[in-house]
Amino acid sequence: MKICTKCIYDERIKGISFNAEGVCNFCIQSEALDSQYQPGTKEGEAKLFELVEKIKKDGKNKKYDCVVGVSGGTDSSYLLWKAKEWGLRPLAVHYDNTWNTAISTENIRKITKYCNADLWTYVIDNKEADDIFRSFFLAGVPEFDASTDIGFAQVLRDACAKYKIKYVLEGHSYQAEGLSPQGSNYFDGKYIADIHRQFGKLPMKTYPNMTFTKFLKSILFNRVQFIRPLWYLNYNKKDTQEWLEKNTGWQYYGGHHLENRATGFLHTVYNPQKFGIDNRNWSLAAAARSGIMKREEALAIYNTPILPDPELITYVQKRMSLTKEEYEAVMNKGEKRSWRNFKTYKKRFETWRPFFYLMAKLHRVPMSFYLKYCFPMPESK
Ligand SMILES: [Zn+2]
């Protein structure tokens, strides 16, 4: 099997190609971003501060000038601090799906306190949250945690509308997380509603679903822009964690995605066991690519099996009200479905492609949204 000579992506990655030196297209793409954003250089810093000044100017006379979504994880905690350091007045926003680990709840408290930032949390009814996770589990689709991503995105936009804020700072770093290869996963608000309608038991009352109308309203009337400041910085996750621990009392939760039990279950149990998907390769490839980790070391970690925490599995079974037998029936013999088996907005996003292209150019939807949602997705193998 062919493996990229720079990172650890191999031939199994969808859409991969290699140049004459054996370097993959994701590494080349990352190099292109380096020359565009110039992280860690004077030029990159200048570009970032130009943005920061614009945010300050647009937020003048308002209580807050930007929103930072916080999860208790490394990237968002750090970004909140940086925003403060740059002289911004961020509102920290959290969508609580009620499956947080105690560590991440504490982390959110500690980092907002350290930064002296206000926190706006939206909490879904916990029984309703369990019912939505259970319906995704019973539906047998790989996007177990989609309701969190969609709910979080909606809550960020709601906070902007409430406080008339024009900017959302996103804690994404291509250096740390890499550019995720276009997989076969997909989700949107209609998908969540349809799965819950078919497999759920409780009415959807407190879940902040993102309907097409709400999405459009936010884009056209609230005109929120999405910015990724970490793209301009030389960002090292490990150093950042040490800094957070030393200065804020923040605590590491033991692994990428493990700050929440739903994401933890998705990445360490559900996806690897039911679908044979191992998403550790994104961040490992990124670490090898940027030289934070030796390529051999990243490969070695990637080749060790994922060890699930038995307590996590018991917890998930209990929250989904499933007996051990019911749980195992779905995991081992249950049907595997995909987003193509349910109702979604996909066709509508594709029809509206020119509109969303314009909106992406104006930063009102992320460019990644335009590229993934507005084009037909290749059928999976
Ligand atoms: Zn590569």
Image (cartoon, rainbow, N blue to C red):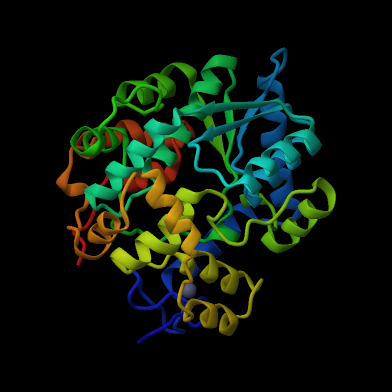
Where's the C terminus, which quadrant? Answer: bottom left
Q: Residue furthest top?
A: 61
Residue 58's quadrant in the figure? Answer: top right
**Residue 353 position (above or below residue 377):** above
Q: Quick check: 281 left or right of 89?
A: left
x, y percentage for residue 219? 42, 24
- Front residue (pair 75, 323): 323
Residue appearing at x 31%, y 52% in the figure: 323
- Residue 38: horizontal and vertical position, in percent? 65, 56
Please report the residue visible at 65 percent of the width from the left and 48 percent of the height from the top: 103
For image coordinates 35% across by 61% down, the residue present is: 271
Residue extending farthest to the right is 247
- Residue 349 in the image: above or below residue 65: below
**Residue visible at 19% across and 64% down?**
333
Residue 64 showing in the rendered view: yes
The N terminus: image quadrant: bottom left
Question: x%, y% of residue 167?
Answer: 59, 28
Residue 129 in the figure: left or right of residue 249: left
Left or right of 298 on screen, residue 220: left
Q: Is residue 376 visible?
A: no
